[in-house]
Amino acid sequence: MTGMSSDSKQQYDVAIIGAGYEGGLLGAILAYKGVKVLMVDNSIHPRFALGESTVRHTFRLMKIIGERFGVPEIKDKFSSASGLHTSVAASCGEKRNFGFIYHREGQHQNPTEATQLVIPPFREGYEAHLFRQDIDSFLTYTAVRYGATVKYRTSVNNVEIDGSGVRLGTAAGEEFRARYVVDASGSFGVLSRALNLRDNPPRLKLNTRCLFTHMIDVKEYDDLVLPNGVPRYPERWYNGTCHHIFDGGWLWVIPFNNRKGSTNQLVSVGLSYDNIRFPRPKDMTPEQEWASFLSKYPSINEQFKDAKPVRDWISSDRLQTSSKQSVGDRWCLTAAAHGSGFIDALFSRGLASSTEVLNALASRLLKAVKDDDFSREKFEYLERVEEANMRINDRLTSTSYACFRSFETWNAWYRIWALGVGLGDLRLTSAYRKYKKSHDESVLPDAEEPMGLFFSQHAGYGELFESCAQQVDAMIAGSASTQQTADEIFRRMRECKFAPPSLKLGDPNAKFINQGTIPAIFQTLKWLMTSAPPEIKEMSMGIMADINPMSPHSRWRTKPALT
Ligand SMILES: Cc1cc2nc3c(=O)[nH]c(=O)nc-3n(C[C@H](O)[C@H](O)[C@H](O)COP(=O)(O)OP(=O)(O)OC[C@H]3O[C@@H](n4cnc5c(N)ncnc54)[C@H](O)[C@@H]3O)c2cc1C
């Protein structure tokens, strides 16, 4: 890094490279709080971006951010799917379930081979499918409303940092100065490249690739007439994020048009492969590869018979990246720019990781601007959070790809994920509830050990997760059959003391999880009042307010979506 002259007129407190979800959200918070923010993006809104399916943790963290920093657009409009649909973008879809339908090559789907995690109908209701071009522009324009400067079509190609500040050089020869720089350029990783931080190869076990596009005229899987029928579970597959899984990969179907009132006709479609077993073919276009895939899976083929891409397919090489470091004096990489914000789209973890990191980053940056102290140690927590998310998501996802080899292993392993999601949600909800009452920063997630995605800092869950993953390792090594592996995971689930019995996690025949029914709620409340462990009881205090059917946020009071 070199020194710099101090005669620039364009001096900012914080420069953000990238005006996507991460850049837009951070820019909005900082600008609202009076920080002089510059956002630089080499593209212009609206523009395509991936990261379309939210999970509970995304909105839970948004609620915390809304309450903590007070930006009205985030607090009132962006912290629930219903708020988002009515006040941010009518082009977004709805997510009422995480669906996983298992397919075998050359055969029509067997309807007994599917699993579903229903999004419970309490609290804010449901999750969302984000049409990112509208979401990212909303966040960026909010930042502008509060005083941020946005430079579009401006490509950062040089970053210099020293004790006195940061200098961003652009492809057009402009120069911007700031006291701190945040790299939110996603997988482009502008800063990690400039500072030579990229691991080559990435320090991740998972090695997957993807081809994706947006399509029109995708059929609703539930309405297909298939030789063996369609799995009938509590929620329609089309009303959620549907994962068609098979040995070696999976396909996402994320409809934007599955909600009454949606103004969008499109569906996001992406095919992910194990990149070792199925490397990107050199002799095929993405269109040909897509056609070849459909010819092997007849039930999926029915869903896409009339579908047409509305934009060119994009085919990637290995998706995973990682950086050696994510914070330094006067700089940091957000989750996506570091590589921890995205491991694989399975389980839709990207935006939740991004939001977790931004919540922690925004509070530290506000303090740094005030104290004029941008030293690395003030931001060290971010590195821990990003590492924990990366490590556990890698373990979770690579184990899942191994479990795709049989339905019984998938049926067992998916419960480990579902339990972690539920308990992590409980933890975040409890933190939000306490913070709302007290505004005491010590109850917030970034005052504790990183979640490592959801609940992995809980000794019992961490042990369950790792011991079951090791069971799958044994299967990969050939020392256990798929059936033995599944049986062992189910056995451990039956012994688990911190999972509500109403989830029926130890029963292989209970293939969907639905905590939203009245009997399940009563069973869980009884368990909470009697045999639940103390830490679960503690986190559940006040839960009744959330599941109250008369609450203004309850889905029981809102009109159902298309059925
Ligand atoms: C295949 C795939 C599927 C995914 N699916 C999901 C999902 O279902 N759910 C989920 O939560 N997450 C998902 N993710 C992760 C998600 O895409 C990211 O976490 C999210 O997009 C991060 O947003 P961002 O704002 O950091 O990056 P982006 O949206 O990529 O924004 C980066 C911005 O930086 C700009 N930029 C790039 N280079 C420069 C430069 N040199 N100068 C200036 N600006 C620059 C770009 O134009 C862009 O606007 C997925 C990711 C992939 C790859």
Image: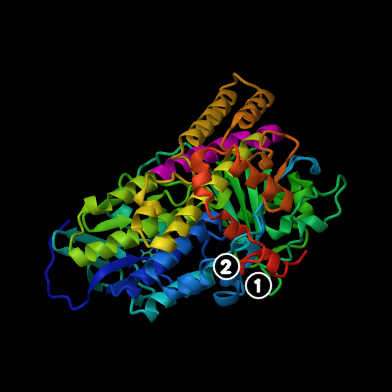
Please name whichever residue, 375 or 339, is drawn nearer the observer in this view of the structure: 375
Spatial CA span between label 1 and label 2: 9 Å
Please give the label number shown on residue 116: none
Task: Classify mark 1 as within 8 Å of ligand 1 or not, answering yes or no.
Answer: no
Residue on which disc 2 sits:
131
Give the image location of residue 398, x and y in percent.
53, 37
In what element is the residue under mark 2? loop
Under mark 2, the amino acid is Phe
Going by the image, does 150 lie left or right of 514?
left
Whether tag 1 and tag 2 are in contact, CB under 8 A, the answer is: yes
Reply above or below: 18 against 7.
Answer: above
In what element is the residue under mark 1? loop
Q: Residue furthest front?
A: 530
Q: What stretch is highlighted in magenta?
A: 388-411
Give the quarter of the figure containing the C terminus: bottom right
- What residue sits 82% from the left and 58% below the top? 223
Give the image location of residue 26, x and y in percent.
38, 66
Q: Dominant secondary structure of the magenta stretch?
A: helix
Reply above or below: 202 against 159.
Answer: above
Please name whichever residue, 163 or 496, is drawn nearer the observer in this view of the structure: 496
Residue on which disc 1 sits:
264
Give the image location of residue 357, x and y in percent.
39, 55
